Amino acid sequence: MEAFEGKKDIFNGIIVNVQDQKCKSESGFSDRLQYSLQEWKEQGIRGVWLNIAIECSIYIAKAVKHGFVFHHAQKDYVMMIKWLPTNEPNQLPGYTTHYVGVAGFVVNELNQVLLVKERFHKKAKWKLPGGMADPGEDLGVTAKREVFEETGIDSEFISLVSFRHQHGFRFGQSDLYFICEMKALSSEISVCKHEITDCIWMDVDEYVALPDISAANRQFAQDYINQNQRGRSFKIKPRRVLSHDHTKYHLLYSIKECNNSEEPLLNYDQNNEI
């Protein structure tokens, strides 16, 4: 009998894709997993990751009997883990703990901000258009996409205004919510009827003064006003920096003093791969 094949990780663990192992039966899988665990312990393997594709889900119960627990699940697989050393605590990293939400603070030439009311909110109030970032999507790209999908307004990223970090969000996870200052490139509104009931342009000062907006949205608007009350202002802007392995670029956000009319915008359409 041979141990399951897998890929070593940087922490002296092993990642096994069960779908690639071609087990013929549940009992065959169980026997081979037991043999593999013994082999891995002798080799000094510390953590085992079992990637079980949905078509192999019949093996999940057998993995549980061998001490594996759930780490995370996606639509087409479940990841199970087992920590092998008995003389030290489990050091396998946990799964994702945060959502990333992005909103566009879109302002036109009349100093009006773009606002929406959500269709499925019980007490809909004026708020910024936005939504969840897709995997691998930069903040400015998310803001531009969400603004266009909800309102039909084309816009471009200027800077970060502020962000909120809250806990106890969906499924008990935390949430990072980034507010992006966006320059309006069009003015004619086309509301997404599936998500939005209303959309308007409103003077920024008028929006801050509304009595029924949330405390967070009021603060976002005030932050925008504070950052743009002078001709020159401090902006939180991204720059492209190389990853630690020099294989791609990441965006690093930092505070810069700039003149809005002279500061070049980062091209989000550039490929981040080297």
Image (cartoon, rainbow, N blue to C red):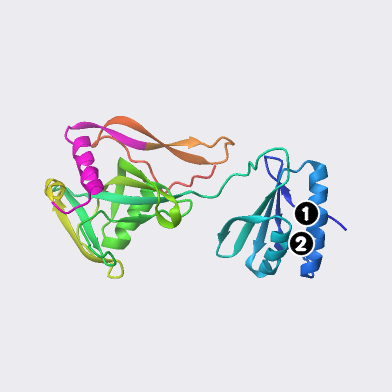
Relative depth, front residue between 238 and 25: 25
| Residue 123 placement: quadrant | bottom left
Label 1 sits on a secondary structure element that is: loop
User: Which region of the structure is painted magenta?
Assistant: 211-237
- What amino acid is found at the position of numbered circle 1 in the picture? Glu
> Which residue is at a point 75% across and 43% down the rendered structure image?
45
Q: Which residue is mark 1?
A: 5
Residue contact at pointers 1 and 2, CB within 8 angstroms = yes
- In the image, residue 272 sits, relative to residue 133, either above or below, namely above
> Which residue is at a point 32% across and 30% down the rendered structure image?
256
Q: Does label 1 or label 2 sit earlier along the sequence?
A: 1
Q: Which residue is mark 2?
A: 21
Q: CA distance from mark 1 to mark 2?
A: 7 Å
Q: How many marks?
A: 2
Q: Is residue 191 left or right of residue 74?
A: left
Relative depth, front residue between 112 and 178: 178
Q: Is residue 94 left or right of residue 105?
A: right
Instruction: Please tell me how crowded label 1 is: few (under 14), some (14-19), or many (20+) other residues with Cα within 10 Å.
Output: some
Q: Residue 42, position in %: x, y?
A: 83, 43
Label 2 sits on a secondary structure element that is: helix
Relative depth, front residue between 72 and 126: 72
| Residue 238 placement: quadrant | top left
Residue 191 in view (yes/no): no
Q: Is residue 7 left or right of residue 220?
A: right
The C terminus lies in which quarter of the figure? Answer: top right
Q: Residue 77, position in %: x, y?
A: 61, 62
Instruction: Please tell me how crowded label 2 is: few (under 14), some (14-19), or many (20+) other residues with Cα within 10 Å.
Output: few
